[in-house]
Amino acid sequence: MQFAMPNLRHLRVFLEVAKHRSISRAAPQVFLSQPAITQAIGKLETLLSTELFERHSNGMFVTPAGKVWATRVRRCMKYLERGIRVAMRGTSAQVSAANLLPLLTTTQLRALIAVTENHSFSVASRQLELSQSSLHRASRELEQLMGITLFEKARSSIMPTRAAEQLARAAKLAFREIEQGYYEISSLQSREVGKITIGSMPLARTSILPEVINRFTRAHPDIGLDVVDAPYNDLLFHLRNGDLDLLIGALRLPAPAEDISQEELLSPPLAIVGRKDHPLHQASSLRLEQLIDYGWVVPRKGTPTRAFFDTLFTEQGLAIPTRLVETSSQILIRTLLSDSDRLTLISTHQVDQELRQNILSVIPYDLSHTRRPIGITVRRDWHPTPTQKHFLDLLKEAAFKYQGS
């Protein structure tokens, strides 16, 4: 079942009732009648399949599920208010973000996100299953409310303005909070739903991640795991925009953005690796000059391992080898090395199975100084659900085991 984002007005109604513990006292704050407020709360409780309030003669008090929901709704509203403020920065608009927030609708923000991501009203309309006229209307209403331009026509597409991108990002993070709240409430009722979306880089996906996935799915069989493989910059972009919950892999030092947080799990050294019977396998007292003329399989520029590879030679005053194949594909690296005299620079954890199966071997050249931090990257203000927290705990346990191996 796909979670449907509720009406923003209903969320604001919920917060006011939770704050005042009374429908009658909340009514003037949201400019709705008491029956309308009762109906809004009822729709939220139906959506979540739980009661958010305990009704007593002396007021309405949030249930445990209601407390979870209140936390997520407040975080949602903070994201939206911050997004409005950032999007309107530098404009002559006279309305404050706090005053604009109650005027926004879920439909407007869903339209904004879809058009911003697809650069097309027609593609966005198919994605949302709404008519193009409805999307155009929602976009115009949002522009009029905020007094800024959100979309500009280009030759063959619709280009979002910087303000549109900033507000769309905030809206995605806000909607993600509500979805997280739904998952948490479902877990409270012993009916786990949802999924964890993980951005994975090469080392993690061949060492600690498979073990953790197997352990986690045994404990949480109804939680889906979506593992996304992509270049680091793409994964970071999607993490910051709420499409991913976390990244696992090589950390960047310093951190590439102020809104992310990194935690080191392990710091394995790199090694030079070739096929099992490579001519250099039994060599002693290898000099770096002896490695230059072999073909190398290396990651693309911009990755930590590639930086180590380049400096390995330049720090010794040597030219960087030129017969390079650039890839991060584990399968391709394994095949290229096993069928040739090529070499690669890689963590032994990353090719642990190949080493155990005697397909590849470590070339005896000391690289103990080339330790690189591997760990978890998340949004700095990310608030994981208990289920996501368990996944993180399993990652840390697996990393601790690898450190001792």
Image: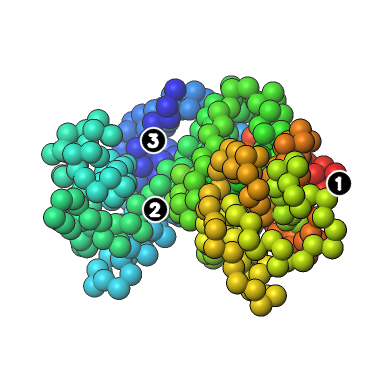
Residue nearest the observer in this picture, 262 or 323: 323
Which residue is pictured at 67% across the width and 55% down the height?
345
Q: Is residue 28 above or below residue 87?
A: above
Residue at disc 2, secondary structure: helix
Quarter of the image where the C terminus is located: top right
Task: Name the residue rendered at 71%, 33% in the picture.
Answer: 211
Q: Residue at x 13, y 39 (%)?
A: 133
Distance between mark 1 and mark 2 Cα atoms: 41 Å
Q: Where does label 2 land, which residue?
A: 169
- Residue at image position (79%, 62%) is 286
**Quadrant of the frame with the N terminus:** top left
Res. 200 visible in picture = no
Judge by depth and name the residue closer to the eye, 6 or 223: 223
Marks 3 and 1 in Cβ contact (< 8 Å): no
Q: Amino acid at mark 1?
A: Gly
Tell me the mark number nearer the camera, choosing from 1 and 2. Answer: 1
- Tag 2 near tag 3, CB within 8 Å: no
Q: Position of residue 295 (x, y in %)?
A: 60, 54
For disc 2, the neighbor class at 10 Å (few under 14, some 14 to 19, many from 20) is many
Q: Secondary structure at mark 3?
A: loop
Look at mark 3 in the image and give the residue it sits on: 5
State which mark lies toward you, 3 or 1: 1
User: Which numbered disc flags the more N-terminal residue, 2 or 3?
Assistant: 3
Q: Earlier in the sequence, mark 3 or mark 1?
A: 3
Q: What residue does disc 1 label?
A: 404
